[in-house]
Image: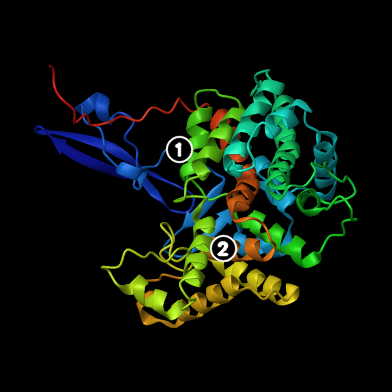
Amino acid sequence: MQDKVTITYNGKEYQYPIIEGTEKEKAIQINSLRAETGLITLDPGFKNTGSCKSSITFLDGEKGILKYRGYPIEYLTENVSFLEVAYLLIFEELPTKDQLAKLQKDIYNESLVDEDLKTILKSFPKAAHPMGVLASLTSALTAFNPNCVDVSSEEAMYKVIIKLLAKFPILAAWTHRKVKGLPLNYSDTTLEYVDNIAQMMFKKPNMDYSPNKIVSDALNKLLILHADHEQNCSTSTVRIVGSSHAGLFASISAGISALWGPLHGGANQAVIEMLNAIKDDGGDAEKYMQKAKDKNDPFRLMGFGHRVYKNFDPRARIIKKTADEVLNSLGIEDPILSIAKQLEEQALADPYFVDRKLYPNVDFYSGVIYKALDIPVEMFTVMFALGRIPGWVAHWKEMRMHKEPIGRPRQVYTGKTKR
């Protein structure tokens, strides 16, 4: 017998079924609540509201668990490539050797963009924020691919997904190269997906490019760790925009804009800005740890704790090791990174932070790695978007395949009555 929840209102009882997911998560199904009772639920921030059923990512914040399609994030970062994870998220299974080879070949066959996109890119001032540029260029892909996708056609869906996986890294790299004042370049079809991303970003016009294994491994792990994170702000944006039957490029562009916010994708940029502020004030990490513990001090320690994870962020455990490898192998002496290490060491040893589970999160370590790789601070969120593309695509595809209705939240009106 199915469990139910009973609501008593105006002397009447109404029953609503309990829905249980495969990981034993439970939800109250309230589709008919308003029709039957005239009531709606009010849940600012949707912290207690499930917007959909999804088989893509499972996240348990209390236990510090993150799994893509059932695979623990710890397994994926140690055993497969980012492109394999992209295939897993979008097409539901890890690819065979032949499927992976075909995917890579199909991506490279689409790894060109219309030259007019360069004109759009050049129209932006050099001071423009890369996320604004990237959102605009991604939206512009719609103009160069105006036909609506036939979501009932497996072939048509595959083609549009391949186009995005092929062209988005080019747009991200061009955005980076504009910031750095470097000439625009294209894919190198002799390189694997992540190595090619690094080549497009870092290759200098007067030098050959050879992949650096430490850099490649770090980027691979960072991209995998950012590939999906359940119904976060940007993913929910992609799904709700897509629910209007907006195309894939338009939906992804909306997700990029949502990710831009400092409370979401901009968090790793905020970490470096905080470290710079500490350096400019003398570099006393201990002083700022005390400020963070003072409830009356407006200072906020960025990159510690997480809204969802009430334990150690499982992604942070993985990327901490990578951050140490990058810093040690590249032999970088940077006062900013030194301050970061001091904050990390003190927070992991201070009972105030340990008791409150305010551990360094993935944004803290990713910001440190990007800084070590000489990626401009304003590009950090672009790197986040580059990793999140497979997750956004998977959710857009799932939403369309499930024929989800157009997103249309309700509200409780608190304005003036008839005037």
Q: Is residue 263 above or below residue 411?
A: below
Residue type, numbered disc 1? Cys
Q: In this view, does 239 lie to the left or right of 130?
A: left
Q: Measuring from the top left, give residue 331's x and y in whole percent.
A: 73, 76
Of labels 1 and 2, the one closer to you: 2
Tell me where residue 256 appears, x and y as whole percent.
56, 40
Give coordinates of residue 212: x percent, y percent. 81, 64
Q: Nearer the viewer, residue 312 or 79?
A: 312
Mark 1 vs 2: CB contact within 8 A: no
Q: In this view, does 292 lie to the left or right of 345?
A: left
Per the image, the residue denoted by label 1 is: 52
Q: Mark 2 points at which residue?
A: 315
Residue for point 80% across, 38% down: 107
- Is 395 or 22 nearer to us in this picture? 395
Q: Locate residue 59 relative to residue 120 in the image: left or right.
A: left
Q: Which of marks 1 and 2 is nearer the N terminus?
A: 1
Q: Which residue appears at 35% of the width and 43% of the height? A: 46
Label 2 neighbour load within 10 Å: few <14, some 14-19, many 20+: many
Q: Tell me which amino acid carries mark 2.
A: Arg
**Visible in this render: residue 355?**
no
